[in-house]
Image (spheres, grey):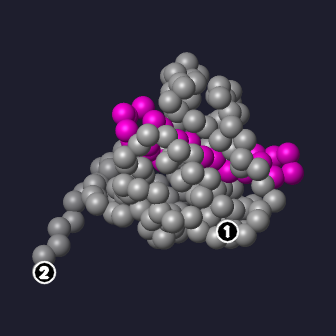
Amino acid sequence: MQSEFLDVPDGKIAAVVTHLQMFERPAPRNVRPVAAQLVEHPKPDPDWYRDLFMRVGGRDWMWFSRLGLKDGDLSAILHRDDVLVFSVRVDGRDEGLLELDFRTAQACELGYFGLTRALVGTGTGRWLMEQALDIAWARPIRRFHVHTCTLDSPQALPFYMRSGFTAYKRQIEIADDPRKIGVLPSDCAPQEPVI
């Protein structure tokens, strides 16, 4: 068996991206009641969105793709009728993010899905996935897909597979380290060394 090592240039990060999909709604799973509500945000304020995005995935897992966008560019995505943004609200505070992207005909991408530390391990993720599946499959789609990477929580990939998604492709993504270009603070995702 051979393996190959590829250099990642200084100032860059690399991740293995796994693409997953499903072609029908899996049987609904029993979920225990949670003390949360799903709130739709048809035209979310960019600052509100960035704050939630950062609290869900930026600080711990190096989510960065939306953080570097200017207000107009971010709003051009989030204010579309075929992009749905929801928060998970607990005691008046938004503690989770669900974004469903229907821009491709007959398909839905699970664009962003996650919870803040306060809700991890409470069963809210399973509840949120059932909400996502209901909303996505209520539309005339033939495919629901998502991708995750090794910069995200190690729980993400097995969670998606338990939720009914099947992995079908892997890629390597190389990007500017967002901590070196000022998109994320330098102390984010300490498990990933800055080189």
Rendered view: 194 above or below 42:
below
Q: Where 26 sits versus 8, above or below?
A: below
| Vertical arrangement, residue 170 with respect to residue 72, above or below | below
Farthest residue toward the right? 91
Quarter of the image for residue 107 reads: top left
Residues 92 and 137: in front is 137
| Residue, disc 1 | 31
Q: Earlier in the sequence, mark 2 or mark 1?
A: 2
Nearer to us in this view, 77 or 141:
141
- Where does residue 160 sit, x and y in percent of width and height? 47, 63
Residue at 64% x, 56% y is 128
Please give left or right for residue 27 compared with residue 95 in the image.
Answer: left
Is any part of residue 193 visible from this angle?
no
Is 189 situated left or right of 40 in this image? left
**Residue at mark 2:** 1
Numbered label attached to residue 140 = none
State the extent of the magenta-drawn residues as a range.
Answer: 89-110
Q: Secondary structure at mark 2?
A: loop
**Dot 2 amino acid type:** Met
The reply to whether the magenta stretch includes residue 179 is no
- Give x and y (percent) for residue 166: 36, 64
Which residue is located at x 17 percent, y 68 percent? 4
Determine crowd level at label 1: few under 14, some 14-19, many 20+ residues with C-alpha closer than 10 A.
few
Outermost residue to the left: 1
- Amino acid under label 1? Val
Q: Quadrant of the N terminus?
A: bottom left
